[in-house]
Image: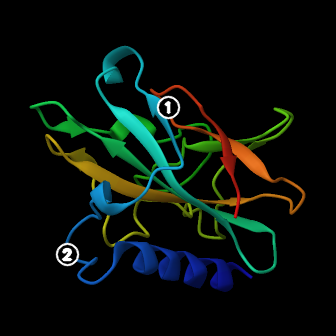
Amino acid sequence: MIGIITVSSALLVLTYAGPGAAAIAPNATDLDSIGSANGIDSQSELTANVHHAERNDAGNLLSVTWSIENPTTDPVVVTWLADRTYTYSGPYFSAVTALSSDGSTRFHPIMDGSGECLCSGNTSSNFSERVEPGESMAYWSMFSVPSGVESVSIEIPGFEPIEDVPIS
């Protein structure tokens, strides 16, 4: 099962990143947004967007593609997106969570048997912790979400929640 999830994650990254993904992080400027949120506190000038929230054929996994947009004139390092609550190994954006539409369940990114987060980080050959001025950098997260959940709120630390994101 873990091998299937890891392969699915790798395919997901390659699918969204396109050719040449191993060399650079994906720029999200060509992706449509299905929800966005403004940054808060020290991230107030940044914007977070959700581009895709797609369920796998079995109906138990949710893949979310999201991005951070930096309209400022200074580069931004987005290392605050790591979650120290769980024992994920390596630098990951594991603090990004999904909340069921009724607010009753919070879903954290899936962790494989090696402690690797199935989200942007060590498992992504196209991972960037830095968003350059005027760029929008895409990332991804994988969640185990019951098939009855039709929409979620995506919570990215430092941003308002992105509510009512439809799952396709």
The answer to which of marks 2 and 1 sits earlier in the sequence is 2
Measuring 81% from the left and 79% from the top, which residue is drawn there? 58
- At 59% across and 49% down in the image, what residue appears? 87
Q: Which residue is mark 2?
A: 23
Residue ID at (52%, 37%): 156
161 vs 42, left or right, is right
Quadrant in the rendering for residue 147: bottom right
Q: Residue 60: name its quadrant.
A: bottom right
Q: Position of residue 98 (x, y in %)?
A: 67, 44
Residue 157 is labelled as: 1
SS under mark 1 = loop
Give the colour scheme shown. rainbow
Q: Is residue 65 or residue 119 the one in the foreground?
A: 65
Name which residue type carries label 2: Ala
Residue 93: where, in percent of width, then height?
46, 49
Of residues 70 and 112, the one nearer the viewer is 70
Q: Amino acid at mark 1?
A: Pro
- Mark 2: which secondary structure? loop
Question: At which x and y percent is residue 86?
Answer: 62, 44
Quadrant holding the N terminus? bottom right
Residue at left 81%, top 32%? 103
**Residue 162 versus residue 107 in the image, above or below:** above
Residue closest to the eye, 168 or 58: 168
